[in-house]
């Protein structure tokens, strides 16, 4: 699985856009295979129209088969001369990135190759490779929602946003969120290169949205609510979580904690990491998510039960926090 179909001739590859996907031990298979299928699928469609597409190559440091984190082995070619001009360089992720970022030979190759490449794409935790290579300094970037905090902590010069499906981090570098987001980004690049019709055709073949609604926050695990150290604040948290639909004004919560509203707000924010109002909203959102997934109750009923008051207030909250409406969320996860 090195090229599009049979090995193209030299004349053919000169006309095609060259895509090189870098492999390493412990890679996430779909981070690699997803973009591979998009680019090669676009090539098949374009070839039928007599147009040039992509020549896709998978390469590793030693050219040996790449063993994924689940044991699947993928054939690879040796990494080419990093100074060779190419159109697109793809850096997948996976648990193997922990070792890959310390592989001096690989990282040296990535830094050099990036300077001779039109665009660099990271998928999932492949953002760690891009950040280690210095490609994301001072730039916005995304990665799998579960690793966003680790990326931000390790590379403070990178402005990490855990919600977008993908981000154009700079004029040259793109970063995608977790796993299947590499497919979303590859479709966007095909659309940029060859137009919406080609990208839409590939998306339909893969049974995918060309542009899926919302961000990756909607797919994240239920938010863990941090516990305060002070007993009065913990008691307030438990009261909010036990009855999300309660009034829970700052004045009422402060009275429960036996503090003045101003002092309570300051202590709560310090202990929990966000203001009381934001915490109440987050608890209500999580409660509503569960009810949308597990019940057939109407959005209006759930909104009232979870403290949003009206369906419209809940809709605005979902769009702001999750990027989708309650109805869209239920269709996806119920």
Image: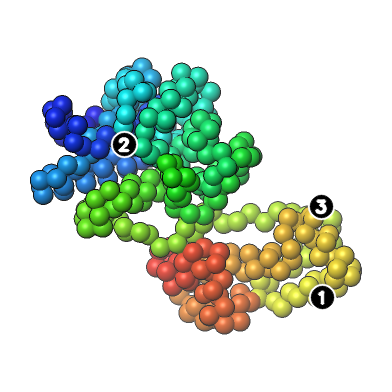
Q: Is residue 235 above or below residue 227?
A: below
List the residue tagged with mark 2: 87
- Cα distance in 3D space between marks 1 and 3: 21 Å
Residue at image x 25%, y 38%? 17
Q: In front: mark 1 or mark 3?
A: 1
User: In the rendered view, does 19 fall on the left or right side of 28?
Assistant: left
Labels 2 and 3: the sequence-earlier one: 2
Q: Position of residue 161 (x, y in %)?
A: 55, 51
Mark 1 closeness class: few <14, some 14–19, many ≥20 residues within 10 Å: some
Q: Is residue 221 above or below residue 30?
A: below
Mark 2 closeness class: few <14, some 14–19, many ≥20 residues within 10 Å: some
Residue at image x 15%, y 26%? 10
Name the secondary structure under disc 1: helix
User: In the rendered view, does 98 fall on the left or right side of 61?
Assistant: right
Q: Is residue 38 above or below residue 301?
A: above
Q: In front: mark 2 or mark 3?
A: 2
Image quadrant where one finds the N terminus: top left
User: In the rendered view, does 91 fall on the left or right side of 239?
Assistant: left
Labels 1 and 2: the sequence-earlier one: 2
Image quadrant where one finds the C terminus: bottom left
Name the secondary structure under disc 3: loop
The image's mark for residue 148 is none
Asked whether residue 183 is in view, the answer is no
Q: Nearer the viewer, residue 6 or 139?
A: 139
Q: Position of residue 203 (x, y in %)?
A: 26, 54
Residue at image x 52%, y 39%? 136
Q: Position of residue 113 (x, y in %)?
A: 40, 27
Residue at image x 60%, y 37%? 155
List the residue tagged with mark 3: 229
The image's mark for residue 251 is 1
């Amino acid at each position: 699985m090195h090229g599009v179909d049979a090995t193209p001739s030299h004349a053919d590859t000169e006309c095609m856009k060259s895509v090189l996907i870098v492999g390493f031990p412990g890679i996430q298979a779909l981070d690699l295979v997803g973009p591979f299928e998009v680019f090669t699928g676009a090539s098949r469609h374009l070839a039928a129209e007599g147009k040039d597409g992509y020549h896709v190559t998978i390469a590793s440091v030693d050219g040996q088969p790449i063993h994924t984190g689940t044991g699947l082995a993928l054939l690879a070619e040796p990494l080419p001369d990093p100074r060779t001009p190419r159109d697109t360089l793809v850096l997948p992720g996976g648990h193997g990135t922990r070792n890959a970022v310390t592989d001096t030979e690989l990282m040296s190759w990535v830094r050099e190759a990036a300077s001779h490449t039109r665009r660099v794409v990271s998928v999932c935790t492949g953002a760690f490779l891009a950040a280690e290579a210095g490609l994301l300094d001072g730039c916005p970037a995304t990665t799998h929602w579960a690793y966003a905090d680790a990326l931000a902590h390790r590379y403070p010069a990178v402005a990490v946003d855990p919600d977008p499906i993908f981000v154009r981090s700079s004029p040259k570098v793109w970063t995608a969120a977790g796993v299947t987001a590499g497919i979303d980004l590859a479709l966007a690049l095909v659309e940029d290169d060859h137009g919406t019709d080609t990208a839409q055709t590939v998306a339909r073949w893969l049974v995918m949205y060309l542009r899926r609604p919302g961000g990756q926050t909607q797919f994240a695990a239920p938010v863990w609510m941090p516990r305060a150290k002070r007993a009065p604040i913990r008691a307030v948290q438990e009261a909010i979580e036990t009855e999300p639909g309660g009034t829970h004004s700052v004045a009422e919560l402060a009275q429960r904690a036996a503090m003045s509203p101003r002092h309570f707000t300051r202590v709560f924010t310090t202990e929990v990491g966000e203001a009381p109002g934001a915490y109440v909203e987050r608890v209500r959102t999580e409660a509503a998510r569960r009810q949308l997934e597990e019940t057939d109750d109407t959005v209006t009923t759930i909104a009232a039960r979870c403290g949003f008051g009206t369906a419209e207030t809940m809709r605005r909250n979902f769009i702001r926090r999750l990027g989708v409406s309650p109805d869209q969320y239920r269709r996806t996860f119920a």
